[in-house]
Image: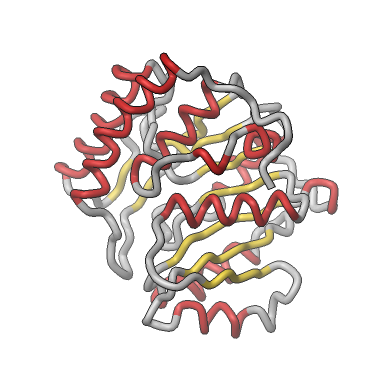
Amino acid sequence: MSIDSTMNHQKLVIIPTFNELENIQEMVQTVMALEGDFSLLIIDDGSPDGTAAVVKSLQLTYPDRLHLLERKGKLGLGTAYITGFKWALARSYDFIFEMDCDFSHDPKDLIRLYDAVKDRNYDLAIGSRYITGVNVVNWPIGRVLMSYFASVYVKFITGLPIKDATAGFKCYHRSVLEGIKLEEVKFIGYAFQIEMKFTTWKLGFKIIEVPIIFTDRTKGTSKMSSGIFKEAVLGVIWMKIKSIFSPYELNRIGST
């Protein structure tokens, strides 16, 4: 396990939040305690439960590593991450992570994702629930099947060689996010995660799936809905059609 805490390899974890009061303090403290000096950017969509207020109080303890962006209203997962990506690129972070706030992703696995990109020379590392079987804890069987076969569907339609196409636990090297035309990312919900992987793959970046164990949240409320799933089903078809008629090209200028 290799950890480099120098400023030459800054690491930023982006966590979008909406009503995560029950999880936010523990999550911040857990990430801050990890070896390797991870920084953390919370993007809160106007949580009425006071999530942002907790983050502000914790910034007194972690003034240089804990950051907060507040937005008015629920603007969607995809727009939150795009905002975070631009914020990270503008501040020269080299390794940029996506993670949920509900502990379904184990923060300790951030180190394994980082190692895969930095030491094994991959451009995108995905925390994968399905690369070594089905590693999901406490999900109803119906949701497990929906998630698993969503990835099968994505691969069938698009050819994307990823076992966990909808995974939201990732580490990007900054070159990927600079190479993607972030302003042209179409989807904001469930399909956002698929679109980012598909675009990364079509642009020729190296992707690896790192096996993780995904544990369903025990506190707070899931944000999943039927509308989000419908967006993904139709969005995959759109991605395939777009790739045929409009080849993917690197953003030579860089997205800032």
Answer with the quarter of the image where residue 83 lies. bottom right
Query: Residue 70 location, x and y as percent?
Result: 53, 72
In this view, which residue lies farthest toward the front?
245
Q: Number of numbered discs present?
A: 0
Q: Is residue 230 above or below residue 92?
A: above
Image quarter of residue 2: top right
Q: Quadrant of the N terminus?
A: top right
**Residue in the foreground of this view, choosing between 51 and 229:** 229
8 or 70, which is in the foreground? 70
| Residue 229 position within the rendered picture, expressed as x and y whole percent measured from the top left | 24, 43
Residue 179 x, y percent position in the rendering: 65, 32
Residue at image location 27% in from the left, 48% down from the top:
228
Tell me if residue 16 comes above or below residue 66 in the rendering: above
Residue drawn at (40%, 23%) of the image: 242
Which of the 4 image quadrants contains residue 91?
bottom right
Residue furthest toward the left?
142
- Compared to residue 82, the image places residue 166 above or below, namely above
Residue 182 image position (x, y, % from top left): 57, 41
Q: How is the image coloured?
A: secondary structure
Vertical arrangement, residue 33 with respect to residue 119, above or below: below
Picture residue at 66% right of the left edge, 79% below the top: 59
Q: Is residue 90 left or right of residue 223?
A: right
The answer to which of 162 and 29 lies nearer the viewer is: 162
- Residue drawn at x 50%, y 78% is 52
Horizontally, residue 141 falls left or right of residue 79, namely left
| Side of 7 where 19 appears, left or right | left
